Image (spheres, rainbow, N blue to C red):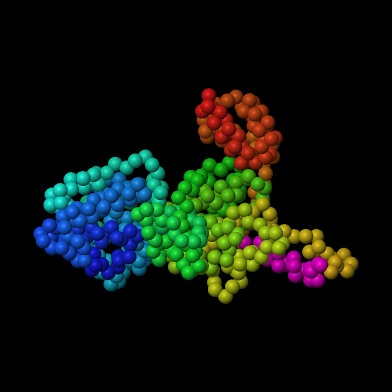
Amino acid sequence: MREQELIVYRTFQDGELLADMAWLMAHYEEAGRGEALAAGRICTVEAVRALFYDCIHRLIELAGTYGFHGNLWHCYLANLLVNDENSYSCGCEIRGGIEGTINEAVLHDIVIFKEFYDYDFDPICERLHVPEFALIEAYESSSLESKVYNTRICARICELAENFCRDSTPEEMKDTLTRFYQEYGVGKFGLHKSFRIVHGAAQGTKGVSWKQGTGQNTRSGMRIEPILNIAHVNLDDLVGCELQKKKLRDNTEAFVSGRKANNCLLFGDAGTGKSSCIKAIANEYYHRGLRIIEVYKHQFQDLNEVISQIKNRNYKFIIFMDDLSFEDFEIEYKYLKAVIEGGLEKKPENVLIYATSNRRHLIRENYGDKNEDGHLPDIRQDMHTSDTVQEKLSLVYRFGVTIYFGAPDKKQFQGIVKALADRYGIRRPPEELLLEANKWELSHGGLSGRTAQQFIDYILGDAELE
């Protein structure tokens, strides 16, 4: 087989399995015919059979890791193609086919992949007496969740593998792959909607390796990793914050549509839906190329590296900072100020920053910062108080859109409870339901959307117990 002749698609996650299978296809007939070695490998029947069984083992392990089903060999090949971030796949993501000589190089590679895809394993199985290969040609996956993909992503890759079976020519197979890139993207940014920053050596599960461009190991040890289980909340699910949702949706709509948009600060009382709105935005605009990267305060020094990895991709990225606030002795906000606005390098057009906070001004201020009474200040105080105030306010001024989330009053709280009860099918007399809700909020955090949701969860759990 010709895996060494690949031009564009050469560096893969778990590419060792492809190399081993290609060697088997090329040398299985030599097993036991007196040749001690073939291409540097021992070529006895026992050694070749052991390698074949090991490949079957790895394919089944990949099924457990990724959640694949059906023909595992086809799923494996499809997974290689959808995760390889190269000049062609990254150019096609979101936008579709691109022009240029690169198409000829890609077609050359797809011809080789189709040879792998259409390969008849019956002669190998007969020659080496390995009937168990049939297990991976019609594999039924277990009910366990994938360690790498959620159910939706796994289904897309398995569907792509089946679509390749219907393609009779390499040209058709290339067109199918290009449409996949256009609709779903490539690599982790194409297959996942939310991410976090991780430091240290990549912790891949068995059968998963990392490479530059996918695992994104850098000199600093920083990489962007997918968040596999994001809450499937929608904006329409959030009750009691209609004006706030509209303002956030309008800004995000402008962003994903390629129009001018602003960084957003969502501030206000605890439990009023600020973080839930960001999660809902991630779900609502994922299909239009929006991705969310969650960054914690202690990771602000990584922001420049994060932006350098995402600025040339065809997706729109929101860098999300939850529960953002600073004490007056913390200086991490200076990194954030420089990234948002003020550094020499312009912030990329495909990046916005959304933050949530319980504070309007983010950085704690002291009365001593505003000492304007004419008395001599304490020697420990700042001599230039106006400069101190401006320094602390300059961060919030860099958010062009600020959205206030206030705690509901009693009537609004009861409206949220009734709306949630209707959504979950709770059939209780309204008077009884609201009376219990009022008792609940008095001892569970006060009037807020979060308290209302917790009360409904309690009712549902109690009903299930009964």
- Above or below, comparing residue 238 to residue 16 in the picture: above
Residue, far bottom: 344
Q: Quadrant of residue 328?
A: bottom right
Q: Which residues are magenta?
A: 380-399
Magenta region includes residue 392: yes
Magenta region includes residue 394: yes
Left or right side of 16 for 329: right
Left or right side of 33 for 219: right
Taking the spot 59% from the left edge, 54% from the top edge, the residue there is 322
Left or right side of 246 for 78: left
- Above or below, comparing residue 241 to residue 95 in the picture: above
Q: Nearer the viewer, residue 33 or 68?
A: 33
Q: Quadrant of residue 77?
A: bottom left
- Residue 68: where, in percent of width, then height? 32, 47
Left or right side of 343 for 86: left
Q: Nearer the viewer, residue 408 or 151?
A: 151
- Residue 361: where, in percent of width, then height? 69, 58
- Residue 218: where, in percent of width, then height? 46, 67
Taking the spot 54% from the left edge, 73% from the top edge, the residue there is 345
Taking the spot 29% from the left edge, 54% from the top edge, the residue there is 76
Q: How many marks?
A: 0
Q: Nearer the viewer, residue 367 or 4?
A: 4
Q: Main secondary structure of the magenta part?
A: helix
Taking the spot 29% from the left edge, 41% from the top edge, the residue there is 140
Please indicate, yes or no, whether residue 205 appears anywhere in the rendered image: yes
Please indicate, yes or no, whether residue 92 appears anywhere in the rendered image: no
